[in-house]
Amino acid sequence: MLPSKDLEIYGIRKIRSGKVRDLFSWKNELWMVTSDRLSAFDYILPDEIPAKGIILNQIALGWFEKTSLICPNALLSEELPEGVELPEWEARLMRVLPCDPLPVEFIVRGYLVGGGWKQYVEKGIVGDYSIPKNLAYGSPLPEPLFTPTTKAREGHDQPLDEKTAKNILGDNYERLKTLALNLYLHGKNYALKKGLILLDTKFEFGIRDGKIYLIDELITPDSSRFWLSEEFERDKTACAHYDKQIVRDYLEKIGWNKQPPIPRLSQQIIKEMQQRYKEVLSRLFPERLKKVTALID
């Protein structure tokens, strides 16, 4: 999302646009601006979700604060420098330390849902792990599972077995795996206190001067699956998703073949998605929601 002002007067240079975030450089910093764009099945959808970028960014910022003692993160500031006037970026900006991203998605699963459930039904395993028989959909796993994938710029991410992941990550493999599992457990426990079940999530790490940093977004509804704990306690097989799964389910329900042309979303789905993302922010970090309410409503 580009503001109307000429960025060059501030010395800001656009690097590229991702599916959801636009990347810029300023002096020795990398700036990430979270848009309202929405992607699913490797496509950017034609419809945006109003204020989604603000909500996502505030959730990620909240988590960076909560997890800074577990793993250093690349966040420098969420505020614009003095003299830079870009109101379009208010509450959407992260100024971060540039790092070399590791080419792996660090996925941790705590419950039998999504791709983990499909694999369990077909093969009785999740990733490289054997799982007890006769578990129901949505069941908590005996322990969180680390199931890394490739990080594809385009197309599908591919699962990585342990041997391949070790070859890619080298001596950092065990440390990164432990960091991912610890971050998930911390997030799961905090979310549970706020009435949310963190089913699974993905982390991204980068390296700078030999040091590991947590980068990109963190435990948002775009990169994670959430259920409400009160619904989970009633019936874990009938929980509503408070994450991007809402849109995936809608696109599959209408029979889209995952090829262009990309279908439009119904106004009901757009409104529902915004409300559910907002609910996640409200539960996790109500103080941040209060700060940006005027920008969302």
Image (tube, grey):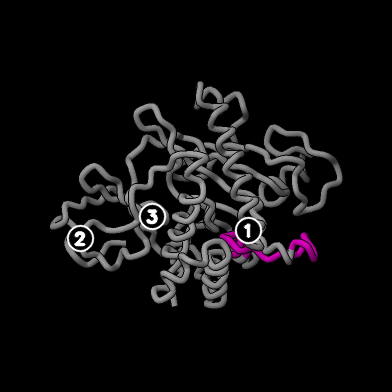
For badge 3, the amino acid type reads Arg
Q: Disc 3 and disc 2: Cα gap in Å?
A: 20 Å
Secondary element at tag 1: strand
Which structural element holds mark 3? strand
Ranked by sequence position, the earlier of labels 3 and 2 is 3
Looking at the image, which residue is at 44% across and 45% down?
A: 154
Q: What residue type is disc 2 on?
A: Val
Q: Is residue 235 magenta?
A: yes
Q: Earlier in the sequence, mark 1 or mark 2?
A: 2
Give the answer, above or below, for where 115 lies relative to 274.
Answer: above
Mark nearer the viewer, 1 or 2: 2
* Residue bearing the label numbered 2: 84
Residue range (magenta): 232-249
Could one spot residue 256 in this view of the protein? no
Image vertical order of residue 45 relative to residue 171, above or below: below
User: Quick one: 255 or 244, which is closer to the camera?
Assistant: 244
Q: Is residue 243 left or right of residue 217?
A: right
Marker disc for residue 21: 3
Residue 160 drawn at (x, y percent): 59, 33
Front: mark 3 or 2: 2
User: Residue type at mark 1?
Assistant: Phe
In the rendered image, the residue lying farthest to the left is 9
Q: Quadrant of residue 90?
A: bottom left
